Amino acid sequence: MSYLPNEPTTFINIKLTDEGRRLLSLGQLTYNKAVLSDREINYGIDRTGVYEIGCDNRVIAPKDDAPTFAQPISYDGSSAFTISVFSARQIITAATESTGFFTGETNSWAIDFDEYYGSNTIDYSVGSPDGTSTITLAGGGTGYFPNAGDLMYVPWETIQASGSTYDPSTLILSGNPTNNLWYRVYSADTGASTVTVDRAIPNFGGSAITTTQIINTYFYPFNGIEEYYGSAATVDTRVWNMNIIRTSSVEGTNSSISGYTSYGSIQYNGTKQYMGFYDETRQFGVVHYTNEFTGNTYAEQLVEKSVEIDIPNVMWHRYPSTAGQGTAYGIKLYDYAGSTIFDNVAQTTFRELRDGTSTSNFVVGRVYHKLKMIVITDPELLTAISYKSNRNYTVPGLNVDSTPVPLSPLTTSSATGLLNTGYTYFVTYAMESDDAYSAGTSFGYPKVLPCQYIQRIDGVVDNVGSPQYLRGFFNTSYFPYLRDASGMDSYSGTGWNLNKAQLLVNKVDTTTSPNVDLNTIPTDGWRLISSGLTGNGVFTGTSTTISSSDITAHQFVVSQEDYDSGTTYVLDSTFYDTNDYNATGLTFGNESFFFGNIKTSILATSFKSVMTVLVPDQDFNSSTQNPSYDGLQDNDTYITEVGILNNNNQLVAVGKPTYPLKKNTARYLAFQLEIDF
């Protein structure tokens, strides 16, 4: 047994009995009548004049298996009386802290040490990184040494002429937008302190490296939500889940390469259908909180216009900065701007998720507050947070249109336009850095996935039937982190670099594929536009590294000859292999936790059964059920229990006041009992 806690004011604690809960499970619970009890009162003590029952007596708390009343009558001998019952709705809200993998705040995030297996270090001067898939951990046994199957997270920093380094004690520092990449450990040799991962690491010169740069590397559980974060292995599960579902294969996937049905997270594809996203949404990222052993952490729904999402390790191409001079990085997303929209397919509401707080900011997804789900639909943002993309930076889409004339020195006499009628053209571009580090020439980063913003243009001819030329160009402000050689040195090896940008075009015959549109972008048949007559499909800049000013000033103008001289694009083996993905391999869709922080307010709706109990002044002023009561000496009675009965006189709930309620002919009592659902 237990007692109700002492409180400065009296309230009535009510609880369903076992019988009440049984009837509730059958859908037969009703509240019809009440009886009052004084069976916890010793009236003799009150007659001493030095003890006040109403203030001093402790009352036993209501129990599930509550003792029933000997008869369904009140303490004064009267029959159970009728009560009135109505339903009330109550909204409860609360704010949550920013929870996830990072501590701190915007532009000064640091990794949360509580949310990973452990860390180690990589020393550039001890034989790694060298462009192979094996690295040496400088910390060896002094730090965490991984097991096969672990995820490895590395904030790479390229070598600079200045030889400067950043502090490895924290992951994210303002002014250090680094190339942070995920890998999966194939094997680990503790004796040699070497780790082999699923694909090639950057090539910074291997054993020829003389710099003393040291960086941290961090190790996380694969499928961590099921195996670690949501399994009570951690004291407090503070991370959200994330699954990136692809219902279309990555561009360049031919018949010899496994397609999207072999990708991770494919089992979540029904969620895309549920929310009314169809083929036009080729990638679909769902951020959710499906963790065990955490209770109802986020209540029943998220509060609209309260969601803030931080992804500190992404270099977002729309970051407000002069081109090439971006320093702070990370992206912050909000559901603040715009109106609430009803999704006719999902039959619930959502708000658009934007990279800022106004309607002029860019939409990257949706927040379904009642489902407690965040959906990221922007393909470039999804690429930057994918484990397998080899880049944590996003790039802008091409602006694509037609032009009647080629670039000089070509003329309409020496070249032919590409955009023939009867064809649809899909256009994007690939980015390459030269393989090995060479000061001022290349910075050693491996191949990355092409731009995932894919444009479409239909064939068009001029007034004499000549096909137009395909033109592509960029907005001027969307390369904030692109560094050429001098910029890479000036900004201490941060940002990303580019040695070549090359158009990718997929030409589809609409006579044989009449229904082709952006919903049915083909995955094979892509062509890397090559030299042609003047190399208009390839841009290498004015020096060996491309500056942001170079690329934004450039226009691609593609002729039929440029297209014909191109080569078929096939997805590089960097992005797939034949290793068993479920053992130690890594493929698209293998993300399981959201590597970021989420802050929101939460909301719960409580429905109350409210029972009004009236105790008139002329009633309940004597007791026939309590043997300690003496009608000649006692002027007051005390209520210590309210029994709620159904029509069959079954005790379904019991209410107990904090202190006994005094009753006499001068007191008319009215109180309400509330049970929340």
Image: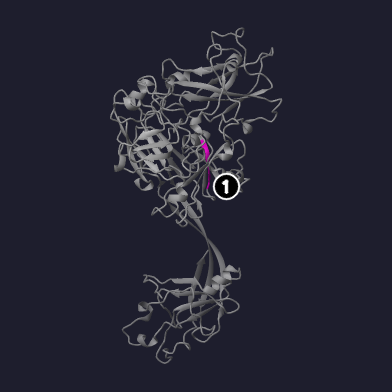
Residue closer to the observer: 171 or 300: 171
Q: Quadrant of residue 55?
A: bottom left
Q: Which residues are magenta?
A: 363-368
Q: Residue 242, percent across and down?
A: 49, 44
In the image, residue 410 sits, relative to residue 14, either above or below, namely: above
Residue closer to the observer: 643 or 277: 277
Q: Quadrant of residue 151?
A: top left
In the image, residue 604 sits, relative to residue 17, either above or below, namely: above
Q: Residue 253, percent across and down?
A: 57, 31
The residue indicated by pointer 1 is 349
Quadrant showing the N terminus: bottom left
Horizontal arrangement in the rendering, residue 629 relative to residue 368 (left or right): left
In the image, residue 487 sits, relative to residue 340, either above or below, namely: above
Q: How many marks?
A: 1
Type of amino acid at the residue the image marks with label 1: Thr
Quick check: can you spot residue 83? yes
Horizontal arrangement in the rendering, residue 253 relative to residue 492 (left or right): right
Helix, strand or loop for disc 1: strand
Residue closer to the observer: 212 or 330: 212
Horizontal arrangement in the rendering, residue 314 relative to residue 650 (left or right): left
Label 1: few (<14), some or many (≥20) within 10 Å?
some
> What color scheme is it?
one colour
- Residue at 69% of width from left, 28% of height from top? 513
- Residue at 38% of width from left, 71% of height from top? 5
Residue closer to the observer: 177 or 367: 177
Prevailing SS of the magenta stretch: strand
Residue lying farthest to the front in this orientation? 191
Q: Residue 45, percent across and down?
A: 35, 86
Quick check: can you spot residue 340? no
Residue 83 is a magenta residue:
no
Q: Residue 562, percent across and down?
A: 57, 15
In the image, residue 634 sits, relative to residue 319, either above or below, namely: below
